[in-house]
Image (cartoon, rainbow, N blue to C red):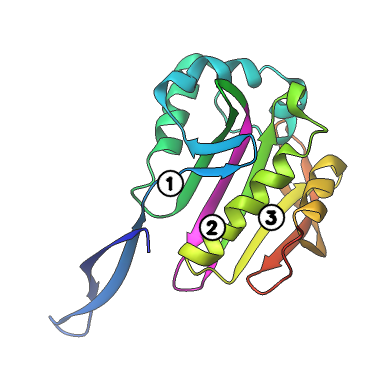
Amino acid sequence: MSIDEAWYEVGVPGLDRQVSLELRRIRAVEPVQLTVGELLLRPWREDDLTAVWTARQDPLLRRWNHSGADTPEEVERLLARWADWGEGDHASFAVVSGPVLLGSVSLHSIDLPQGDAEIGYWTVAAARGRGVAARATVAVCSWAFATLELDRIQLFHAVENPASGRVAAKAGFTLEARLRRSHRYGDGVRHDELLWSRLSDDPTPW
């Protein structure tokens, strides 16, 4: 398994002057590269800054995938977080073809004891309609089920963003629920969201 395991103890206040120690497992996910046809999914790098800044000028991307990074300096800090898999809570991939950035897939909110995580994706305007997000999402899910031994991966998107739902369906996810006013997006509005999931024993879409 491409996981580094470290053990540490966390002090929890107890009765009298006793302190109980809870042993918890932390797994730092080792960065990997995945290949899907002409697509390469790799960890983010510092030299992706210009491409990410350019992509984030797209109004659709800013509306549905806004992360609070509105200046080149903020995007630089965001890239540094994406590139650091050391906490074990996410695995963030740049999706490229040759030197060209096509998009992003991020497995995040990883909870190894529970065996679940969330996934999100975006593509640059020029890469839309080519199946890039769906193929990359399937690749990351397959890796996560096999390597991280996850059982459930879920995703959320605004009801008004049907393109994201089409990606979810193509990537083998099942629509489960509509959540009312569950998240505030980049337009400043709290939108209803659709919840999708994929389980480790669900059929692979292709």
Is 160 located above or below residue 49 in the figure? Answer: below
Q: Are marks 1 and 2 in contact (CB under 8 Å)?
A: yes
- The local crowd at label 1, few if under 14, some if 14 to 19, many if 20 or more residues have their Cα within 10 Å, is few
| Circle 2 residue | 143
Residue 62: name its quadrant. top right
First to last magenta residue range: 102-116
Residue at horizontal 75%, vertical 23%? 125
108 left or right, relative to 103: left
Q: Which mark is residue 155?
A: 3
- Image quarter for residue 18? bottom left
In space, the residues marked 3 and 2 are separated at their CA atoms by 16 Å
Q: Amino acid at mark 1?
A: Val
The first of marks 1 and 2 along the sequence is: 1
Q: Is residue 149 left or right of residue 10?
A: right
Q: State which tag comes first along the sequence, 3 or 2.
A: 2
Provide residue 93's location: percent of width, then percent of height.
52, 40
Callout 3, which amino acid? Leu
- Front-lying residue, 130 or 53: 130
Badge 3 marks a residue whose secondary structure is strand
Amino acid at dot 2: Trp
Mark 3 and mark 1 lie on one chain; the one further toward the N terminus is: 1
The N terminus appears in which quarter of the rendering?
bottom left
**CA–CA distance between discs 1 and 2?**
10 Å
Q: Nearer the viewer, mark 3 or mark 1?
A: 1
Identify the residue shown where x is 40% and y is 31%. Answer: 80
Q: Which residue is mark 1?
A: 32
Given contact means CB atoms under 8 Å apart, are the residues at marks 3 and 2 in contact? no
| Badge nearest the viewer, 3 or 2 | 2
- Of 138 and 162, nearer the camera is 138
Asked if the magenta segment contains residue 103, the reply would be yes
Question: Which residue is at the front of the view, 30 or 22?
Answer: 30
